[in-house]
Amino acid sequence: MKLDQASILQLAEHLEDCELEARDTLKVTDQHPDMDWDDAYAIQDEIRRRKLARGARIVGLKAGLTSHAKMKQMGVESPVFGFLADTFVVPDGGEVRMDELIHPKVEPEICFVTKAPLRGPGCHIAAVLAATDFVMAGIEIIDSRYRDFKFDLKSVVADNCSSSRFVVGGRIADPADVDLRTLGVVMERNGQLIGLGAGAAVLGHPAAAVAMLANHLGARGEEIPAGSLILSGGITEAVAVERGDHVNLRIQDLGSVGCKFI
Ligand code: 0L1
Ligand code: MG
């Protein structure tokens, strides 16, 4: 690691304050160009510790930048991983308050709920499917704390991968009953099409993103616990939303889920 503990604590506090006060900032690597991946995940871990200390619960995990559409949109080449707190949950059909966010974008995702722990190294698609209780549709609302969504990967990781809100819902399905690669995905804003794709847009199979997450955690001596909700990554580019927008996502065999921005 290149950063000392005081810098990790200060950067975590700064990024979380930006999240909670809905204000943007410059990417953390501007001030600390030498920081490494361990520093980035240590800052994210400290944000998680701060939330837990205030009584939040961690309800899941996410993989981000797992599709070519998203990698191209953000100019990066590898996935990143973050956590989901209970304070990020929006009920299906619920309201997302724009005054709590900076510049939110929505992305359509296939979500997994596990019934057994998953631990790398060596985790693969089959192990993920065997450990999956059910899959469902989800809209992730990302809200990078970085000005104009301008960042590099280490800054993104430190910022908990732009995690902000998420909505899950629709119909739950046993992964044995659906082909997650070919499920059609349609996302609309105010009735207009804004995203179209299929599950295979995520690393060829969305379960591959979950396996990568398990392998990433395994390298850190951690695992995906049973009962975790996992967002496997945006199938299309993320799309900016404004106050008054209604967003609806339909995924073949998984029903629909939606929210409105007020
Ligand atoms: O969930 C995601 O794909 C977000 C990853 C972080 C980068 C971004 O803000 O787009
Ligand atoms: Mg996402």
Image: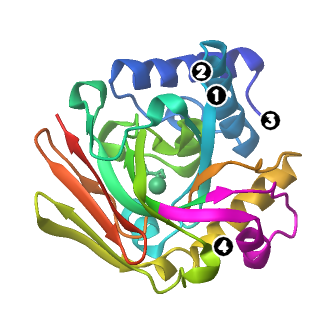
Gap in Å between the C-alphas at discs 3 and 2? 23 Å
In which image quadrant can residue 54 be found? top right
In which image quadrant can residue 231 be found? bottom right
Q: Nearer the viewer, residue 79 or 232?
A: 232
Q: The disc labelled 3 sits on which kind of residue? A: Met
Gap in Å between the C-alphas at discs 4 and 3? 29 Å
Number of the label disc, if any, that sits on residue 208: 4
User: Which is nearer the N-term, disc 4 or disc 3?
Assistant: 3
Q: The disc labelled 2 sits on which kind of residue? A: Lys
Q: Which residues are magenta?
A: 113-136
User: Which is nearer the N-term, disc 1 or disc 4?
Assistant: 1
Kindly identify which residue carries mark 1. Answer: 48
Q: Is residue 130 magenta?
A: yes
In this rendering, the answer to whether 150 lies above or below 57 is below
Say what secondary structure mark 2 lies in: helix
Gap in Å between the C-alphas at discs 4 and 2? 29 Å
Q: Is residue 149 magenta?
A: no
Say what secondary structure mark 3 lies in: loop
- In what quadrant of the picture does the C terminus appear? top left
- In percent of width and height, residue 116 lies at 80, 57
Instruction: Confirm or deny contact between disc 3 and disc 2 (CB under 8 A).
Output: no
Q: The disc labelled 4 sits on which kind of residue? A: Ala
Query: Dot 2: few (<14), some (14–19), or many (≥20) neighbours within 10 Å?
Result: some
Ligand 1 within 8 Å, label 2 CB = no
Instruction: Confirm or deny contact between disc 2 and disc 1 (CB under 8 A).
Output: yes
Kindly identify which residue carries mark 3. Answer: 1
Q: Nearer the viewer, residue 226 or 142?
A: 226
- The residue at 41%/32% (across/down) is 26
- The residue at 65%/20% (across/down) is 52
Gap in Å between the C-alphas at discs 2 and 1? 5 Å
Q: The disc labelled 1 sits on which kind of residue? A: Arg
